[in-house]
Image (cartoon, grey):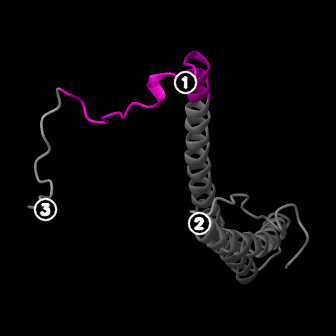
Amino acid sequence: MFGKEKYGYSMIDIDDPRYIKECAQMSQKLIRLHYDQQIIDYTWRNTYKGLLTAEHRLATLPENKCPQKTQDLMKKEVDSCMKQLLELQQQKDMYEQQIKEIYERCDSIKATIKKENDLEDLRKTMEKQTKEKISSDSPFWKAKFNIRSVNAPPRSGSLSFD
C-alpha cells in the first residue's frame, strides 16, 4: 500500500452467498481505487503547493526592474501548474465517483438483504401466532390448501401432458 491512511484497507462486509463473488470484486476494486486516490491526492497537494509558490513568486516580482521575459516565464509556470491541477482535480472527481458507485451498489445489496430478513421474520412471527391460535390436533393442519383462487381465471399457456 502507498500508506496506512484512514481508508487504506477498506473491505465490503456483505457475506450473503448470492453476492459473495460480486462483493469480492467490488472490494478489490475499492481497495485499488483508494490506493490510486491516495497517490492522486498526494500529487494534487504537491501541485497545489507548487501553484502557490509560483503565484507568490509572480506577485513579489519587482514591477519595473524585472525583464518581461522573467514575468512571462513566471506566468507560464502559474498557467502550467493551474492546468496540471485541473487535470488532477478531474481525476480526483472520477475516482470519487467510482467509489461512490461501489458504495451505492453495496447499500442496495444491504437494503435487499434487510428487506428479505424482515419478511422472513414477519413470516415466522405470523406462523408462530397461527400455531398458537389453532391447536395441533385441529383438522386445519391436515387439510390440503389450494394456492390458486377459486375465482381466478384458468392459466393460459400451461403445459398439457395429454
- Rendering quarter of residue 7: bottom right
**Which circle, 2 or 1, is nearer the viewer?**
1
> Depth-wise, is mark 3 or mark 2 nearer the camera?
3
Is residue 147 found inside the magenta-colored segment of the image?
yes
Disc on res. 137: 1
Q: Residue at x 60, y 33 (%)?
A: 124
Q: CA distance from mark 2 to mark 1?
A: 65 Å
Question: Where does residue 97 sit, x and y in percent of width and height?
Answer: 59, 60
Magenta span of residues = 125-150
- Secondary structure beneath label 1: loop
Whether tag 2 and tag 1 are in contact, CB under 8 A, the answer is no
Q: Quadrant of residue 115?
A: top right
- Residue extending furthest toward the top: 133
Residue linked to disc 3: 161
Q: Which residue is mark 2?
A: 94
Looking at marks 1 and 3 on the same chain, the residue that comes earlier in the sequence is marked by: 1
Amino acid bearing label 3: Phe
- Amino acid type of the residue that numbered disc 2 sits on in the rendered structure: Met
Quadrant housing the C terminus: bottom left
Residue at x 69%, y 60% (from the top left corner): 15
- Whether the residues at callouts 1 and 3 have beta carbons within 8 Å, the answer is no
Q: Position of residue 146 (x, y in %)?
A: 30, 35
